[in-house]
Image: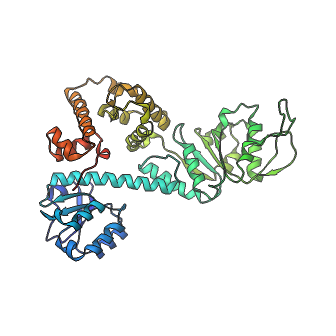
Amino acid sequence: MASRKLICLQDPKQWILPDEVIQSGWSPIYLDSIDKARALISAEQPSLGVVLLDSRWINGLNQALEVLLQDTAGAVEWIGLVPENWTQNENTRRLIARYCSDYHTLPVDPRRLMMSLGHAEGMARLRRASALEEEAHPEGVSLVGESSAMRNVYRQIRKVAKVDATVLLEGESGTGKELVAQAIHRGSLRCEGPFVAVNCGAIPINLIQSELFGHERGSFTGAHSRHRGHIETACGGTIFLDEIGDLQLEVQVNLLRFLQEMTIVRVGGVKQIPVDVRVIAATHKDLAAEVKAGRFREDLYYRLCILNLKLPPLRERREDIELLAHYYFRKYRNLASSKVQGFAPKAMQQMMAYEWPGNIRELKNRVQRALVMCEQRTLGPKDLNLQIESLQNEVSTLADARAEADLRVLVAALNSNDNNIMKTSKELGISRVTLYRMLDKYNLSGRFQENKD
């Protein structure tokens, strides 16, 4: 098992990480001073830490400790360790409430601590993903994912947004090419200008020239007035040419001339009109193969492919499937009745096993449909209607039925107790440790809050 670093801000003579926790994969780094902790956090940027809130910190270095916790808020998820009866101390309670995601009284229950560390690690992962998204693109562009493939996409977005060169986005249908184009635009110096999206494959061939370049009055039957095309409309901003691989060869010639000279001539006109616009093109086709087949101009291909981003299909970023599913569940929650609370375990199992030929677009559509059709408390396999033969033929076991029943009872108890951990565990007649385990098992950890006082 891979080792995960854990800051332990205390003297190791006072407390050490239990063997069970170390064996589960956590590697403690003991630090007995705030200066050492600050230096290590700055150098290695760890995401989790535990701090022993005893008399040394509370009575002697309270202010320095609070400054450290405040400065690292959002970067480090802190878990407080408190000697017995010290929760009655006002300073202790304040530090826990303001800066700690959880706390434990000594002696620590190893299993309970592992639960807290797992939850804090999940929260830190979500914070990192959110930070990556915010750094990659401004608010309003819904790119979702924390897989290594998506982190690479975010890094590329940040790089290409800073320059004004033409970009070619390649990827299967439904992988979010327009969202990436919007992210590039909003992160660029042209962000205040217009973003004009054009689906080249959806415009009839007899209208494509007029739609892209505009036309003069009387240039053809029905042209009753001058018309500015999409390229001219995008002046000062970005034009996104989606499915550019579907352009006819005669239109490709005019587009190449525009890219070379940054001027256009309206249909029926003779005047060269300069246009200050950035071009982002996208295609689900292999343009290099299209060039070899003679269906796409080689010179245009190289003009478009100055900067190239390849978007991964969903099947190559499976760790993002659950994150995307919950994102679209929250986004379209209003489509379902109030009793629908989440995904059944077997439904999520099917989603993780499915190949997603339609990528993110298909996942979004299936979640929307499931929310409309669902008649139970959780979205089940039938609601998603995924055709997976190996799973469709699987016989429901007693364990499956037990899991479904446990989930229904758990969700009902959480609802009736306003997601309060202590009240819910008492109602169910189980320990908080068992409840934490069930929340993790059924992917419900993110919906609860614990009253720590």
Corner quadrant of residue 59? bottom left
Q: Residue at x 36, y 32 (%)?
A: 338
Residue 412 image offset from top left, x and y in percent? 25, 35
Q: Residue at x 19, y 47 (%)?
A: 422
Residue 56 image offset from top left, x and y in percent? 19, 74
Q: In this view, does 154 lie to the left or right of 296?
A: left
Q: In this rendering, is residue 215 above or below 188?
A: above
Quadrant housing the C terminus: bottom left
The colour scheme used to paint the residues is: rainbow
Q: In this view, does 127 lie to the left or right of 16?
A: right
Residue 255 image offset from top left, x and y in percent? 74, 44
Q: In this rendering, is residue 267 above or below 206?
A: below
Corner quadrant of residue 349? top left
Total marks drawn?
0
Q: Is residue 129 left or right of residue 426?
A: right
Residue situated in front as seen by the camera: 437 or 17: 437
Q: Is residue 39 left or right of residue 264?
A: left
Is residue 443 something one can see in this rendering?
yes
Corner quadrant of residue 178? top right
Residue 128 image offset from top left, x and y in percent? 40, 56
Q: In this rendering, is residue 22 above or below 438?
A: below
Is residue 52 something one can see in this rendering?
no
